[in-house]
Amino acid sequence: MGGPVQQAGKTIRAVLIAGPTASGKSALAIEIARRFDGVVVNADSMQVYSDLRILSARPSVVEEAMAPHRLYGHVDGAVNYSAMRYAADVAALLPELWEQGKLPVLTGGTGLYFKAVTEGFSAMPPVPEAVRSAFRARAEDVATEALHAELAGLDPVMGERLRPSDRMRIMRAIEVHLATGRSLASFQGEREPGPLDGLPLLRLFVSPDREAVRARIDHRFETMMAEGALDEVVRLRERKLDPLLPIMRAHGVPGLMAHLDGAISLEEAIRRGQADTRAYAKRQVTWFRHQMTGWQSAAPEAALETALRELEG
């Protein structure tokens, strides 16, 4: 069997597999891709970066050999990649896969990526690099609370919406206002359809036991350290990238950076990385439960059976 799947009189155009980190999504996606002549397409916001193969838990070389993989490690860490960019990359990729008769199997834990390709996304304006660079250079030594006060003066609506401690979103809102003269809120009501909007899809959320996931996260982080995660962070640190870039907030990076700066021990850095990842997994479950309607939920041990039942009719 290969390509988009006929099921109940309709053609399943893509399979979407979400779930918290360390829930077994990648293995499930690979198995479905193998059985249905599919291609595994990344939907994880950190696995897009070439700099963090180990620390982002990208599929291994052996796993990538089991089925074709796309949109993994295709972005440089210096790029401020976004859900909008992701949707554009998927929109460019899907016709190629469908023309080849391949079944796209999107998998990852970034809910906004799934929303972007299905429900669509706000038509956010691009911020010219000159505007962004000038503002960030000016804001580098400015306290977050002061930036929030600046935002409140420029854009009272977003000033009211954003917490005074949310530096990243505050800066984004100021940049948009400086670039366009408009409130970020005015763009959030304008939506562009996603490339999978309205198409027949299989949407599956892998829902593991919470304690099992916590144990897997801790063990996986230790394995990543043994495989060279610290070396990745050393190389990333040498690049001296903007600390507000997404890659600089990847789970494990802040703690390991602090260790390399001599602020904390390696053991403490590992504990922080594990704790941050566990907290993230909990947020992922909560987010999908409230944000993603129409998804089937299955325990890891039943997920393949659930998918096969839907795909094979």
Image: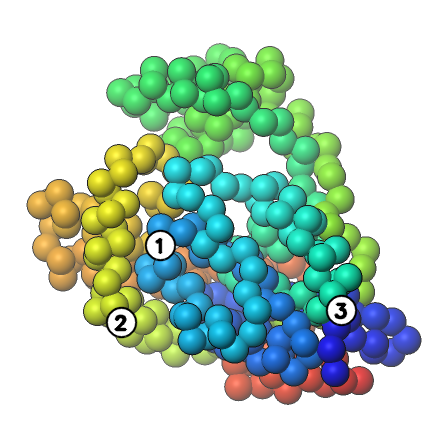
Q: In the figure, 138 relative to 89: above or below?
A: above
In the rendered view, does 262 fall on the left or right side of 135? left
Measure the alpha-carbon separation of dots 1 and 3.
31 Å
> Quarter of the image containing the C terminus?
bottom right
Q: Say which of 298 and 11 sits in front.
A: 11
Q: Which amino acid does label 2 sit on?
A: Thr
For residue 281, side relative to residue 271 (left or right): right
Tell me the amino acid under the disc marked 3: Gly
Name the residue rendered at 23%, 63% in the picture.
228
The furthest residue to the front:
100
Residue 82 is situated, as x and y percent measured from the top left of the image, at 53, 41
Q: In this view, does 51 lie above or below 286?
A: above
Query: Sequence-wise, which precedes: disc 2 or disc 1?
Result: 1
Which amino acid is tagged 1? Answer: Leu
Kind of element beneath mark 3: loop
Compared to 251, does 187 lie above or below? Answer: above
Query: Mark 2 and mark 1: span between their CA atoms?
Result: 14 Å
Q: Position of residue 172 (x, y in %)?
A: 48, 28
Q: Which of marks 3 and 2 is in front?
A: 3
Residue on which disc 1 sits: 52
Q: Give residue 101's mark.
A: 3
Do callouts 2 and 1 mark residues in contact (Cβ within 8 Å)? no
Residue 62 or residue 301, whichever sits in front: 62
Q: Would you name the residue on which mark 2 appears? A: 223
Which residue lies at the image location 76% right of the left edge and 69% below the top edge?
Answer: 101
Q: In which quarter of the image is residue 292?
A: bottom right
